[in-house]
Amino acid sequence: MARDLTQIREKAGKEAELCFTSIYHYVTDEDNLHASYRDLEPGKAPGIDGVTKEGYGKDLGRNITDLAQRLAQLGYRPAPVLRAYIPKPGSDKKRPLGIPCFEDKLVQRAVARVLEQIYEADFLDCSYGYRPGRTCHQALDGLGRTIQRKKVSYVVESDIRGFFDHVNHEWLMKFLGLRIGDKRVLRLIWRMLKGGVMEDGLTHASEEGTPQGGSLSPLLSNVYLHYVLDLWFERRFRKQCRGEAYYFRFADDCAPRAQRGPKGPQSVQLFN
C-alpha cells in the first residue's frame, strides 16, 4: 500500500491537471485502514458512541474487515460529531471542536492518507499548517528571514474569523472535483461534511464548516485555502504589486509582506 500511495504522488506531481477517477479502492484497502489506525493517537476524547482507540482495537482485525466491506459497498455512514468547547488562547472565548466517533476518525484518516499524496504535489511552499514535515517554527523562520533579507516595508497579518465553522461546502466540493474525479470519494467526503453535530443531546444539520477535531478537516481546509488564498496571491495579487510581495500561511492565519513601491508604500486590499 505504501508503494501504491507513493505512485499516486508521483503521478500527481508529473500531471498537474490530472483528475484522479479511480482511487476509492485505496481508501477501502485494509492495509490502509490498519495504517490509519496506527496513525491515530491513543487517549483522545471519544465521540457520541463512547468508543476509544483502545476499545476499537480489542477486536481490530474483525472491525477493520467489517469497515472495509461497508465502505466498499457504499454502506458506511458517519455519525454526527460531538460538539465540545476548549479555551481559545489569548481570548475569553472558547474554540468549538467537533469530535467524531472513533471509526469515523479512522475513515477520515484513511481518506486523508490518500488525498495527501495528490495535494502535497499541488500545495505551494507558502503553506505550512497541517502538512507533513512542516511546522509553525518553519513558517516563523521563513517570515523572519524574509523580513531581514528582503526590502520589506510593511507586514500585514490576517486571521479568518471562524474559518473552520464557515467553510462553504459547495465550493469545497468544486475545488476537490478539480483533482478528484472518483465520485465515490466525493460522496464519502460529502457525507462527512453533512453528518451533523450533536450538542446538549440534540443533533443539528451541518450546513457549512468542517469542524476542528477530525482527521480530515485540516487537509480539507488547506485545499479550500489553496484555491481561495494561495493561488489568488501568487497569480493575481502579486502581479498587481509595484514592488516585491511575499506570503506565508499557517492554516487560516497568513502574513503577506511587501516592498516599498517606486511611488511609496502601496495600499493593500487583501479581501474584497
Image (cartoon, grey):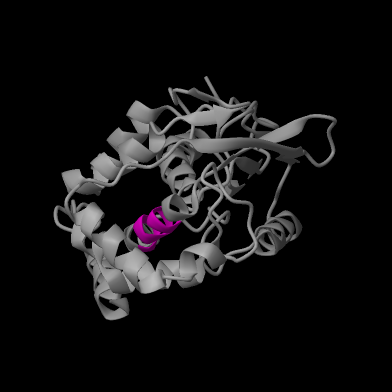
Q: In which quarter of the image is the N terminus?
A: bottom left
Q: Which of 242 and 26 is in front in this view?
A: 26
Is residue 108 located in the magenta-colored stretch of the structure?
yes
Q: Which of 271 and 155 is in front in this view?
A: 271
Q: Give the range drawn in magenta.
A: 106-113
Q: How many marks?
A: 0
Q: In this view, does 238 lie to the left or right of 4?
A: right
Q: Does residue 48 sit above or below 29 in this rendering?
A: above
Q: x, y percentage for residue 65?
A: 28, 67
Q: x, y percentage for residue 232?
A: 44, 37
Residue 249 seen in the figure: yes
Q: Nearer the viewer, residue 113 or 118?
A: 113
Query: Could you tell me what secondary structure mostly forms the magenta stretch?
Result: helix
The residue drawn where x is 68% and y is 39% is 260
Q: Is residue 195 left or right of residue 272?
A: left
Quarter of the rendering containing residue 116: bottom left
The residue drawn where x is 55% and y is 45% is 47
Q: Which residue lies furthest to the bottom in this view?
A: 3
The residue drawn where x is 36% and y is 64% is 63
Q: x, y percentage for residue 6?
A: 30, 74
Is residue 171 located in the magenta-colored stretch of the structure?
no
Q: x, y percentage for residue 244?
A: 58, 46
Q: Which residue lies furthest to the top in this view?
A: 272
Quarter of the rendering containing residue 118: bottom left
Q: Is residue 235 left or right of residue 135?
A: left
Q: Is residue 10 left or right of residue 214?
A: left
Residue 181 seen in the figure: no
